[in-house]
Every structure is written in structure tokens, then in C-alpha cells.
Image (tube, rainbow, N blue to C red):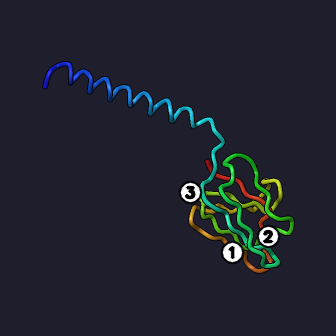
Amino acid sequence: MPVIERRRRRLGTAVQAVLLTLTVAGCSGLGRTAVGPVIYTTEQDAVVEVNSPSVKGCHRLVPEGAKEVSNDTLIDIILYPTPDCTGPGTTYLATTFTDVNAAGAKPWRSFSTVH
């Protein structure tokens, strides 16, 4: 293989690596989401689906709260019994898991993502 062909190949590989790095760096500043749905059942047995919530901030559930929450996103979430993601009594809900409140327990009113 001639020397010029090897140099072109190496240069091509280096250019591809630089372009890939720039693409990844450029996308990291975009609003990231927790790809997939968080599905919950309210106290009145209504099913609500929140698709790909943002990984930033607190996400309120319906005012009456949820008695069952399924995390079908690609990241873990934390459930709160308050509407503002504060206070004690939280539950860590890993991806692909479901949490069902015990009888008499406070409903979940908000969640945040773990990132």
C-alpha cells in the first residue's frame, strides 16, 4: 500500500473522530429528556402517561396524586408525597420498576429524575 493512501486513511479517520466529538459536544447542551414514559394511576383509577419528561426540575402529578407509578424511562426517578419535590417520605424508583402505595399511605404528588 503506497504511503499516500495510508496518510489519507489516517487523515480520514482523524477527521471522522473530530466530527463525532463535535457532534456529541453540540448535542449535550440541548434539553435532555428521560426517554420513555412515566405512567401513573390516580386515586380515582385514571391512568396518566407523561412521555419523555425533562431530566431537569420537578414534575407535578395530578393534584389528587398517584397511588401507583411505573417508570418506563431510561433513567431512575424519585417520587415525593409533596407537589414541589421536597420533604421526607420519598421513594427511589429505578427504571422499568413500578411502585404501588400501601393502603392508607399518602399518594405521590411529584417526581424528579436522577441524573
In-front residue for pair 107/53 = 53
Query: Pointer 2 and pointer 3: residues touching (CB < 8 Å)?
Result: no
| Number of numbered discs visible in the structure rendering | 3
32 or 64: nearer the eye?
A: 32
Residue 49 is left or right of residue 10, and the answer is right
Per the image, the residue denoted by label 3 is 74
Displayed quadrant of residue 72? bottom right
Crowd class of label 2 (few under 14; some 14 to 19; many from 20; radius 10 Å):
many
Rounded to the nearest angstrom, the CA distance separating label 1 from label 3 is 20 Å
Where disc 2 sits, the SS reads loop
Residue at the (68%, 67%) spot, across then down: 39
- Reading the image, the residue beneath label 1 is 100
State if disc 3 and disc 1 touch (CB < 8 Å). no
Tell me which amino acid carries mark 2.
Pro
Q: Label 3: state its secondary structure.
A: loop
Please give left or right for residue 103 compared with residue 17 in the image: right
Q: State how far apart marks 1 and 2 are (Cα).
A: 10 Å
Given contact means CB atoms under 8 Å apart, are the residues at marks 1 and 2 in contact?
no
Which image quadrant is residue 19 in?
top left
- Which residue is painted at 20% across and 19% down in the image? 4
> Vertically, is 111 above or below 68?
above
Q: Name the residue type under label 3.
A: Leu
Q: Check residue 80 in the rendering and tell me which mark sits there, or answer none.
A: none
Q: Is residue 104 above or below residue 89?
A: below
Q: Nearer the viewer, residue 34 or 106?
A: 34
> Would you name the residue on which mark 2 appears?
107
Q: Earlier in the sequence, mark 2 or mark 3?
A: 3
Label 1 crowd bin: few (<14), some (14–19), many (20+), radius 10 Å: some
Disc on the earlier residue, 1 or 2: 1
Residue 68, x across and y down, in percent: 71, 73
Task: Give the secondary structure at mark 1.
Answer: strand
